[in-house]
Structure formats: C-alpha cells, structure tokens
Image (cartoon, grey):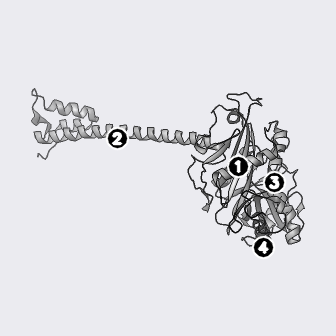
Amino acid sequence: MPTSVHPETTKIYSHPLWIRCLVIKESFSPHKKREKAGFPDEYWLTICFFVFMSNILKLVARKTMSLYYGVLRCIKQMDRNARFFASVAGISGSGLARKRSIRGFPMIEKKKVPFIFLNGEIIPFEEAGIHPLNTAMKYASSIYDAWRGYWNPEHGELYLFRLREHLERLLRSAKIAQIQCPYSVEEMISHHLELIRSNGLREDIHSRIILFVDAVDGGLYSTTPMGVVMAAMPLGRYFKDESRGLHCCVSSWRRISDEDMPPRIKAAANYHNSRLAGLQARHDGYDDAIILGRDGKVTEGPGYTLFIIRDGFPITPPVTSGILEGVTRDTLLILFPEVLSRKVIEREIDRTELYVAEEAFFCGSGAEITPILSVDRRPIGDGNPGPLTLQIRDAYFALVRGNRDFHREWLLPVYDTTGR
C-alpha cells in the first residue's frame, strides 16, 4: 500500500456515501485506470462492500423502528380502549391487576370479578361496555356513590357498611344534578346483594353504583335514557402498609364551591378538581394533597375528608366549607364521643393550623382512616401516627367488621349465615 494518498482518495471521502459509491464505481470503469486512486482492486472491493452493507443496515433499522413504534401505538390504543370500558365499573387499567405507588408508598392492587350489573342485568364482566359517544363520556353527565364491605372470617360473613346511607346520598346527588334514578333504595340494595352473591365474594370489597345519561351522541342537556352500573370489586387497604402515613402538601389548586360545581354532589366531573391537585402533589414529590377553598380555609383532600387534633380535640371543616358530606366523616362524629369521650369540633381550619396540629388524618370509604405525617415538609406532631388517630382507627375497624356490639344497624350481612 503506497505511503502517499492520491488526490482522488481525498475527493472520494469528501462526498456523501451515495456519491462515494458512484466515484468508486467509476474508478472500476474499464475506461479509467484503477491505479490512479492509489489502492489495489481488493481495497476498492472492500470499501464498496462496507458502503453497500451500511446502507442496507440503515434501511433495515429504519423499517424495524417504524414497525416497533407502529406496534407500540396499537398497544397504547388498545389500552386506552380498555380503560374506557373499565371506567364505568370504577376500576383502572385494562381489567388486569395493576399496581402504582406514590413516593414509594404502595397502593392497592385491583382484581376483576366474573360479573357486573349493567342496566338491570347481571352480565359477564368482560361484556360490559358503553358507546364512545355516550353523553356521560362527552359531558361527564354522571353521578355515583361508593362504599365498602368487610369480611369477617370468624363470623363467615361479609358486612356492607352503611349501605343505605350511601344510597340515600346518591339520591340527593341525583336530585341536585337533575339525573333520574330508576331504582328505589330497596331495589338497589337487592340488586347489589344479588351481584355480590353471584361473584361469590368472601373478602374485603369496594362497591360503587354509577348513574349516567346513556344517550348515544346526546346533547349537553340530555337527561334520558338513564344507565346504571353497579360493581363490587375485591379490595384490601387503599394504602397497603397501614403502619405508615402520608406526606402531604397544600395544593395551589383551589376547591370547587357550591356556587359553581357543588362538591356536595358526588359527581364524576367534580373529581377533575381532585385529580389536578393530586397529580400536582405527586409530581412535586408528595403522597397527596390538601385543598384550600377560595377563602384560603382548609377543605379536604382529593378524595377524603380531613380531621386534625388540637389541644386533644378533633376538629374538622363543616359541611358548608366546600366538602363532600362524607359517610365516614359522619361515622367519626359519632364514634369520637362514644369511644374516646371527645366531641368533634366542626369549624373552619386555617392553613397554618395544619403545621401546628398534634395529629391529622384523612378519612373516607376508600382510604378509611389514614394518618398524615407531614404537611409542606413540616412534621405533624413527632412525625408519626398520633395516639388518638390510632385509637379511633382501631375502633372503626372493629365496628365495620362486626366485632363491636354497638351500631349493628350500620352493618348489612350479605350471606346472613350466623343470624346476626
């Protein structure tokens, strides 16, 4: 191989690959001397081969990536469709068990069941669906309510906790939202018991009923026909590790009010406000959020009412402060004086009271009683679940599982195997 580089070689390497190939091809033309390029024939053949193969590999890579992203788009679209159909049942994802976490805090895994109630019938879970242009999907014209059931293995019984109160709240929401409910409370109870028994559920569950305007491509003011979905899903604790609590922030989003979107209604549309606050909190590294009203006073969390402990007494915002009239909240208003001899004070709460509270916790049918450990990175008390929080939580769980003798009227046995 010569030590000097022929000028043609420099010229070749200054061109794009396709021009290089032309130049190389030209160098092998019988009308020119190949020797002037400065290399033997074998070297030119090697260069041509590698240039050719590099272009082939680039073409294959482009086609492969195009196919990969095409398949990925199809999978994402299928998942979106599955989420859409599952949304009417109040579950997340494509019906498969999913697990998500916030700041490393493990949350529940949801399972599917064989049957679901849709428009007067108990049908296979996989067959439930509504039209994509359903009015409820277009304009969020739906309301719902949700409650829990607790399995007691010693009694061999599943107890539904305060089901009647939840269904009565549903009818109040329907009245305000001008959505007609086709069933009475007794009929809804009967359908729900039949659904649970059909699924053979003998574990802790979370149930919900959704009333929605079922018009296909209906208008903004459509009120008929009405659709009804009822689901009973296995569900343990909302937050798996009950010994831990939440690190919360005060959200920059403000709570909706009775003047625009009444939070007294348990409506799907209202939860967009909660969603914004919760997503912001998790993006900023917190477990959850506390939302203030437009007056700067504390209201509640994204899906739970709020209690704080000051000077040994529980305090919670009044129902006129832009909160949902929670059934669990009402339960604690009764339990605190009966079990702990402490009357709950219902009054406005300032933001700074959160920082100096001795204890704080969220409560709701889903979250039950969940301690709050810090707010805006300021520890609540000593940064651990407080004694009153733990005592009222123990009393609550004993009650809902049928292990206490008082307020048995709040428990509806599903199988009634013990006669209790």
Quarter of the image where one finds residue 417: bottom right
Q: CA distance from mark 3 to mark 1?
A: 26 Å
- Between tags 2 and 4, which lies in front? 4
Q: Are marks 4 and 1 in contact (CB under 8 Å)?
A: no
Upstream in the sequence, badge 2 or badge 4? 2
* Mark 4, other Cα within 10 Å: few <14 / some 14–19 / many ≥20: few
Q: Which residue in the structure is indicated by mark 4? A: 387
Q: CA distance from mark 2 to mark 1?
A: 56 Å
Q: CA distance from mark 3 to mark 4?
A: 23 Å
Asked if one can make out residue 115 in the rendered structure from this viewpoint, the answer is yes
Q: Which numbered tag is attached to residue 194?
A: 1
Q: Residue at x 68, y 56 (%)?
A: 205
Q: Are marks 2 and 3 in contact (CB under 8 Å)?
A: no
Q: Which numbered tag is attached to residue 104?
A: none
Q: Which residue in the structure is indicated by mark 2? A: 61
* Quarter of the C terminus within the rendering: bottom right
Q: CA distance from mark 2 to mark 3?
A: 57 Å
Q: Residue at x 78, y 53 (%)?
A: 163
**In front of the other: 321 or 416:** 416
Quarter of the image where one finds residue 17: top left
Q: Which numbered tag is attached to residue 326?
A: 3
Q: CA distance from mark 2 to mark 4?
A: 62 Å
SS for callout 2:
helix
Quarter of the image where one finds residue 120: top right
The spot of residue 165 in percent (x, y) is 83, 52
- Between tags 2 and 3, which lies in front? 3
Upstream in the sequence, badge 2 or badge 1? 2
The spot of residue 158 in percent (x, y) is 71, 60
- Between tags 3 and 4, which lies in front? 3
SS for callout 4:
helix
The spot of residue 52 in percent (x, y) is 23, 37
The spot of residue 335 in percent (x, y) is 85, 65
